[in-house]
Image (tube, helix red, strand yellow):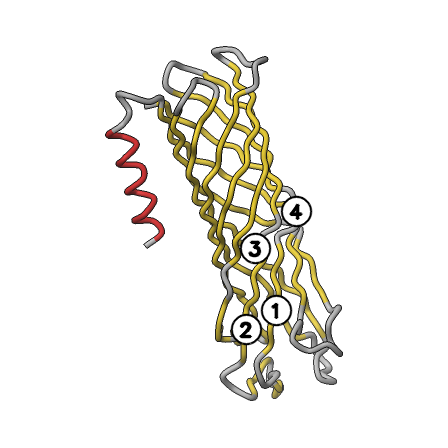
Amino acid sequence: MKIFFLLQLICFGLLSANERDLSLSLKGSFTTGTRFLYNIDRPNSYGEERTISSNIGYGADVRWNIVWDRFFLGFSVEKIGAHEMVPVYYMQSDIPIPFDEGFELTTMELSGYYVVPISSEQFKFYLGGGLGTCDGDRNFSIAKIKAATVSTATYLGIHVMTGIDYQVFSRLGVRFEIKFRDPHFNVTTKFDQQVTEYRGKQIQLPQGEYVTKINLFGVNYAGGLFFTL
């Protein structure tokens, strides 16, 4: 549904290209940190956390020049994910048990961009900000048994950014952008089985539902190509 919505916006932009300056960009991104806060529904356990420092993403956005030549309106979609495995001596086991923690997140953002006056035809410096939503899921497993997702909560928040466009050719350029935002969402998970076997050992899996808050608190760096239509 999200991809279909994005395609609709792109098609609308293509139909309007004769009247408005329009660009489409494809990008890769790196977010410096994601924090996992565990058992937030259990006050006695609150405070346990883990951080993953390498979060890779990719996405696309479309921008229209509206009202006047220094203001653009844009819509973007980005998918971000990461995972990290840590061996843990769990439940008095005498061998390390792999704890694999990770997430997948999809953001959809509506932004406004202002091109600052020091820009030129070749270099455009801009400031921006707007609103966005995110939907995500937690990918957590113990001894290669994945926890099932019971429910997730959608996040609505704001973002600010700065960036630069360099026009290499008349319709092709490169873009670098830094974005500040604080997306977070809660995920409720549980294991559907009580025990599993790992390397000949019976491993007891946690029972009951657990709520984890996943927070991308780091700075988002993105770079890619844009095409002027």
Kind of residue at disc 4 = Gly
- Counting residues from the N terminus, which is met first, the one under dot 1 or under dot 2? 2
Pointers 1 and 2 in contact (C-beta within 8 Å) = yes
Give amino acid for label 2.
Answer: Thr
Residue, disc 2: 188
Mark 1 residue element: strand
Secondary structure of residue under mark 3: strand
Residue ID at (71%, 65%): 49
Q: Secondary structure beneath disc 4? A: loop
Where is residue 72? Give x, y as percent.
44, 27
Q: Earlier in the sequence, mark 3 or mark 1?
A: 3
Label 2, label 3: how far apart the Cα atoms are: 18 Å
Residue at 45% x, 47% y is 108
Mark pair 1, 4: CA separation? 18 Å
Q: Residue at x 64, y 54 (%)?
A: 34
> Which residue is under mark 3?
82
Q: Which mark is residue 218?
A: 4
What is the spatial separation of the Cα atoms under label 3 and label 4, in whole angstroms?
Answer: 13 Å
Is residue 8 placed above or below 90 in the rendered structure? above
Please state which amino acid type lies under the numbered disc 1: Thr
Asked if disc 3 and disc 4 are in contact, CB closer than 8 Å, the reply is: no
Q: Is residue 163 left or right of residue 167?
A: right
- Specify few, some or many for label 4: CA neighbours under 10 Å numbering under 14, 14-19, or 20 or more: many
**Which numbered disc, 2 or 3, marks the residue closer to the eye?**
2
In this figure, which residue is indicated by the disc labeled 1? 212
The percent position of residue 120, horizontal first and vertical second, equals 52, 11
Task: Check whether the beta carbons of the residues at disc 2 and disc 3 lie within 8 A of each other.
Answer: no
Upstream in the sequence, badge 3 or badge 4? 3
